[in-house]
Amino acid sequence: MEKQITKTSEINWKPLIEEGVKTDGISVKTLCYDDVAKRPTAFLSKFEPGASYPNHSHPSGEEIFVLEGEVRSGKDELKKGDYLYMPPGSTHSVFSKTGCILLFKVPEEVVILK
């Protein structure tokens, strides 16, 4: 992967669309895209009030930084400025009562748990 600059003020939010996954009220801006894996590895995610992402696992872990608002990640309540590291194999769901913008770093695709 080569050096990349992403000017987030110049790109629009796009609805998060994942086949078979309810993602209403979640939008994303891709920051870093892995051409080999064909997926973003770093992205901004905006949750509208009441939006949620279902329970899932992280084969290679995950990092979350809260830029705006508040979010619940599993049992953890996170607010603006909070950082969360989830180790490989960890599981959680994500919900925002009031809305939020998050920075995600996800090195490998998540697995939705039924």
Image (cartoon, helix red, strand yellow):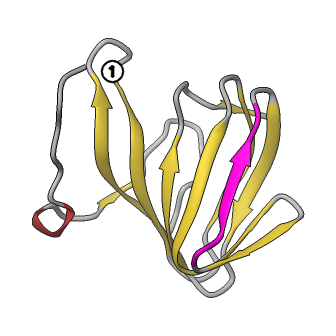
Of all residues shown, which one is farthest toward the right? 75
Is residue 22 something one can see in this rendering?
no
Q: Amino acid at mark 1?
A: Lys
Q: Position of residue 91 (x, y in %)?
A: 82, 40
Residue 68, relative to residue 17: is it above or below?
A: below
Within the magenta stretch, is there residue 85? yes
Image check: 12 left or right of 43? left
Point 76% across, 53% down: residue: 93
Which one is nearer the viewer's eye here, 37 or 111?
Answer: 37
Point 25% across, 19% down: residue: 1
Is residue 47 something one can see in this rendering?
yes
Residue position marked by numbered label 1 in the rendering: 38
Q: Position of residue 97 (x, y in %)?
A: 69, 83
Q: Quadrant of residue 108?
A: top right
Of all residues shown, which one is farthest toward the left? 10
Within the magenta stretch, is there residue 17? no
Image check: 7 left or right of 46? left
Q: Position of residue 112 (x, y in %)?
A: 70, 34
Residue 45, relative to residue 19: is it above or below?
A: below
Label 1: element kind = loop
Point 29% across, 32% down: residue: 33
Residue 89, relative to residue 72: is it above or below?
A: above
Q: Quadrant of the C terminus?
A: top right
Image check: 83 left or right of 33? right
Point 17% across, 31% down: residue: 3
What segment carries the magenta color?
81-87
